[in-house]
Amino acid sequence: MKFSILSGVLAASTAFGSAAQAQTEIQWWHAFTGRLGTLLAEQVDTFNASQSDYKVVASHKGNYSETLNAGIAAFRAGEQPDILMVFEVGTATMMAAKGAVKPIYQVMADAGEPFDPGAYLAAVKGYYTTTDGQMLSLPYNSSTPVLYVNRDALSAAGIDPDTDLSTWEKVGPVLDKLKASGSTCPMTTAWQSWVHLENLSAYHNVPFASKENGFAGLDTQLEFNGPVQVKHIDQMGKWAKDGKFIYAGRRNEGGANFRGGECALFTESSAGYAGVKAEAKFAFEIRPLPYWASVEGAPQNTIIGGSSLWVMEGKSDEAYKGVAKFLNFLSTPEIQAKWHQNTGYLPITTAAYDLTKEQGFYKENPGTDVAIIQMTSKAPTPNSKGLRLGSFDQIRGIIDEELEAVWAGDKSAQEAMDSAVTRGNVLLRRFEQANR
Amino acid sequence: MEKRVTFKGWLLPLILLTPQIIVTAVFFFYPAGQAVWQSLFIPDPFGLRSQFVGLGNFEYLLGDPYYRASFVTTAVFSTLVTLVSMGMALWLALLADRLIKGSGVYRTLLIWPYAVAPAVAGVLWLFMFNTRVGVVSWYLGLLGYDWNHVLNGSEAMGLVVVASSWGRISYNFLFFLAGLQAIPRSVIEAAAIDGAHFWTRFRTIVFPLLSPTTFFLLVVNVVYAFFETFGVIHTITGGGPQQSTTTLVYKVFSDGFVSQDLGSSAAQSVILLVVVGALTIVQFKFIERRVHY
């Protein structure tokens, strides 16, 4: 099949003589379907139409994990794509793969393309940047957790829908009132580890792991069994026991309950905005993620989730030139602003943020800038740049298990966090050994 | 007495066996050998580096209490899946065998679920039992039962067992029905004339005569429950809550294909291979003796 297309193209190009120089194809493997897939395809089409030297071919390879696996398997077979989309959890895996990936700062320098890391939002690019300031991959879709509020549910429980929900201390009594008035789901969450441990730690400027959350070395140890995290998980466990926090599942299962109108409060990614807006038949509002006012220095900034684009090794200089041009194209304010406004993901550059402001988007869609303000209001610290931990997918799985033990009342918060740290550290040591 | 068919030369048997040997070598011995080899290393995902650790991966696994616990989970899960899928299938086959009118329609409908892919079956059951919006859990709620498989381990286990057994019932049904129809009518009629009731006939004649089919299905279903159920578990529970539905093969899948810990994953598949091999030997040694061919 491939061969016949190729020979067809060859035949056509010979037939038309030397009408055009052959285009360099750039393969981009990604994990998006549905609306996100359509928007991605639109970006590719726009780029392909804008010039004639390069042709980007985007291929969907399954979900995030499957795409990463496809990329790894292809690399082992010597057939890797030029660009691979990798979720934030896979960052440490990609970063450790020296010889398999080509850092983006190098791609740009070799291709002679203009590249200014300062143009990208510090909180976004920090996740993908080394401790000495070198950007390794290009952030593509980034989001951060926020609080979604069902205003109608608050009113129904006799609570002023404009009530202050900025701190967990203030959320507590609201949950009490909701429960007392008969709510079956005062609060739920998506991505519990990401929101209630990873972001909680960054937001309160406490370490999730040693060595700057893993940025400064593979010999990092988990440290999320500290007093701030335990206090929060303990409180969540109490709320779970009293039916004030409803656990719906490890991923974003809770979203269905919130969008259906059952739950009053919902902690979820800012990228959930489009879904809530499309489905919710009640007045809803986006608020910043609550923090513990009792913790000094809070709120710091929250960290991102999502994916970035990694450039793979083993391609021609010509291909890398095209890759550099394409990545720069993706970072242009117009493309980024459109992506941000259509999806609820964060704009990755300051210029795109400013453009969106200029266009009046935030005025027409109140709450859509909550996430970006929450992320950028303070300069990130070593505790709030992000996480770079090997085997992090498995560690998240362990955290999920231990949190479930707390929600079910089988373990205390301290026991569960201690156990998760011990089990996770074993995996970190294995990862360290594999990448020595 | 065993009957032996002997060939005169060695060329013909060799030619007849070669395709099977090639297939086994390429699709079984080669990958199994690779798994054993890989289980001695901790490689990085991209195959750029690899550390020889000897039996380190096995030490790491067997020293992990959570891994040891998943043996128990697997035993419970496989036993339940085998019992449920074979029991239901036998019962349905007995009923379908007695049908006079419309048996074709029943049979066709009963075979359909087999065509549903495990992951899709998982999603179907997940929708029905979704803790808060599922149809079944909603009706259970009306009856005063609070279904919550995302936090209740036993309910999660029950759900993955049912979802894994469901499609399998069709497969087993097909074999049981064929087995039942191969039993000569005359034997059963003779027993009926002697005054044996349905249950007596089933216990003393039908079930013993069905034993080759039952034994075959037992082996096949245990292998199924061990190896082919990770799709269902992945879609419904992801191994949770806590570790209550993390079976051995699910761990192989999630450590290897989701988390890229290839050394551990290879070591786990070697352990699994040994366990299932031992189990099959036990079945052939002790249960097959009671099978009447």
Image: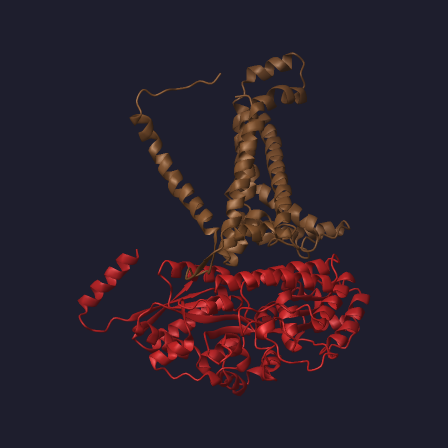
Q: Is residue A343 visible?
A: no
Position of residue B139 relative to residue A205, above or below, is above
Q: Furthest-right residue in view?
A: A180
Position of residue B92 relative to residue A82, above or below, is above
Q: Residue at the spot x=54%, y=62% of the render?
A: A391
Q: Which chain is brown?
A: B
Q: Which chain is red?
A: A
B19 or A158: nearer the viewer: B19
Instruction: Give the image location of residue B16, x and y in percent.
Output: 33, 29
A41 or A28: nearer the viewer: A28
Position of residue B173 relative to residue B27, above or below, is above
Q: How many numbered marks does the figure carry?
A: 0
Q: Is residue A346 left or right of residue A169?
A: left
Q: Is residue A298 visible?
A: yes
Q: Quadrant of the N terminus of chain A?
A: bottom left
Instruction: Give the image location of residue A172, x and y in percent.
Output: 77, 72
Where on the picture, by quarter, is residue A253? bottom right
Q: Residue at the spot x=55%, y=26% of the render?
A: B288
Name the image colouring.
Answer: by chain
A433 or A259: nearer the viewer: A433
Position of residue A211 relative to residue B29, above or below, is below
Instruction: Give the image location of residue A47, x and y in percent.
Output: 37, 75
